[in-house]
Image (cartoon, rainbow, N blue to C red):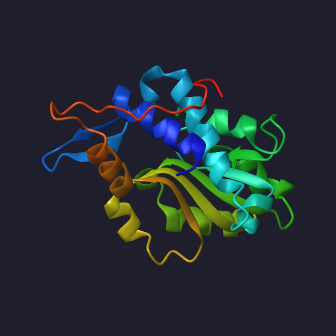
Amino acid sequence: MQKYTKQFLDLALQTGIIHQQGEGNCLHIDPFFQGNAHAVGLAARACRELMKDARYLDICNAGMLMAFDNPTYPLLPVTAQAFHGGDAKGFVHYATYNRYKLGERPNGDQFVILSTMENEVELRGAIEFIGKYLGTCVGAVMLYSSASSQEQNRDIGIPVLRVITEQYAEAYLADHTNSEGVFVPPKGRESILD
């Protein structure tokens, strides 16, 4: 597991940002991170860490980051700030697409979709939207992905990078839960603020 993904997952499970919910006790993520600014920063770093993986050159080299989430979700602006130099250049939210429709469309730009939760994005519609109005969609980065969303988007046609999957979070939680049912994150050597 990559460094920031592990740090985010430890904090998210410990604080309840990722928690069990519903009849089947499925794991869900609080898209507002319960107001925990440190968790938002770690989540953004985990997304960027995965996007920079050399196996995903198209995603790594894409010029634009596009979000379809609720614009108030904190992951979006924080990740945008870290995208290509720290000034949010190259980040656009779908709510601002009208300016592209009016003739300011980027020429041949490659877009990556960013989402807090995979089930919050109708991925096929987002890919079609980008292709029709903006450029080419070369991939998607999902911070948290449920098992059902993975199944729905199995043959989507673009690489979908999932920082944390429901299956992985469940296994990690089970491996680090003590006999009293309390999650105990493994101690790491990394600085909490690194």
Relative vertical location of residue 51 with respect to residue 180 in this rendering, above or below: below
Q: Quadrant of residue 32?
A: top left
Residue closest to the eye, 47 or 22 = 47
Q: Position of residue 189 (x, y in %)?
A: 56, 31
Q: Position of residue 142 (x, y in %)?
A: 52, 53
Left or right of residue 103, residue 154 in this image: left
Relative vertical location of residue 47 with respect to residue 190 in this rendering, above or below: below
Going by the picture, which residue comes out furthest to the left? Answer: 23
Residue closest to the eye, 53 or 132 = 53
Q: Position of residue 151 (x, y in %)?
A: 36, 70
Q: Residue at x 71, y 49 (%)?
A: 98
The answer to whether residue 192 is seen in the rendering is yes
Q: Residue at x 58, y 34 (%)?
A: 42
Quarter of the image for the C terminus: give it.
top right
Q: Residue at x 84, y 40 (%)?
A: 85
Q: Position of residue 129 (x, y in %)?
A: 62, 64
The answer to whether residue 27 is seen in the rendering is no
Q: Residue at x 23, y 30 (%)?
A: 182
Left or right of residue 28, residue 96 in this image: right
Relative vertical location of residue 24 with respect to residue 178 in this rendering, above or below: below
